[in-house]
Amino acid sequence: MKNILEKNGYQVVGEAEDGQVAVDKYMELRPDLVIMDITMPRMDGITAIKKIIEADPEAKIVVCSAMGQKALVIEALSAGAKDFIVKPFQAERIINAVQKVIG
């Protein structure tokens, strides 16, 4: 994911190994966009999305999911995510989602 973004001119300012770290890094770095996995240790992606949106209703979040997680994707979109990408990642779909969300 990072390589795809950087090859297309985007700067990755932070990475998080779990949902709590993602929330903490968002508060510290205030990135233009967050790409959030749904399934993570400690705090799942949906809870992290809710916490980020609560702190910053204008946050732009794209959620990642595995095939077969349709209900979780819908929940993530309801929580405030703006778009989603499905694993395995396709570079074109990632860039399209990023461009759609941040313009």
Image: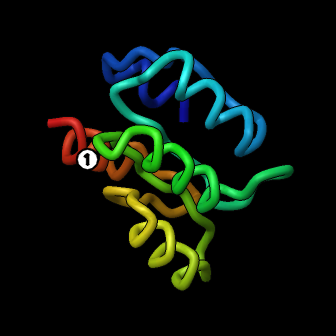
Q: Nearer the viewer, residue 37 or 6?
A: 37
Write the residue at 35% across / 40% down: 59
Amino acid under label 1? Asn
Seen in the picture, residue 65 relative to 45 is either above or below; the reply is: below
Q: Which residue is mark 1?
A: 96
The residue sitting at the left extreme is: 103
**Residue 16 rendering spot, x and y as whole percentages:** 70, 31
In the foreground, 61 or 58: 58
Q: How many marks?
A: 1
The residue at 50%/63% (across/down) is 86
Q: Secondary structure at mark 1?
A: helix
Quadrant of res 79: bottom left
| Residue 94 sits above or below residue 70 on the image | above
Quadrant (top left/top right/bottom left/bottom right) for the C terminus: top left
* Residue 10, horizontal then vertical, whole percent: 35, 19
* Left or right: residue 12 compared with residue 97: right
Q: Residue furthest front?
A: 55
Q: Residue at x 63, y 58 (%)?
A: 47
In percent of the image, x 50 and y 75: which residue is there?
Answer: 75
**Which image quadrant is residue 84 in?**
bottom left
Left or right relative to 17: residue 74: left
User: Left or right of 45: which side holds 1?
Assistant: left
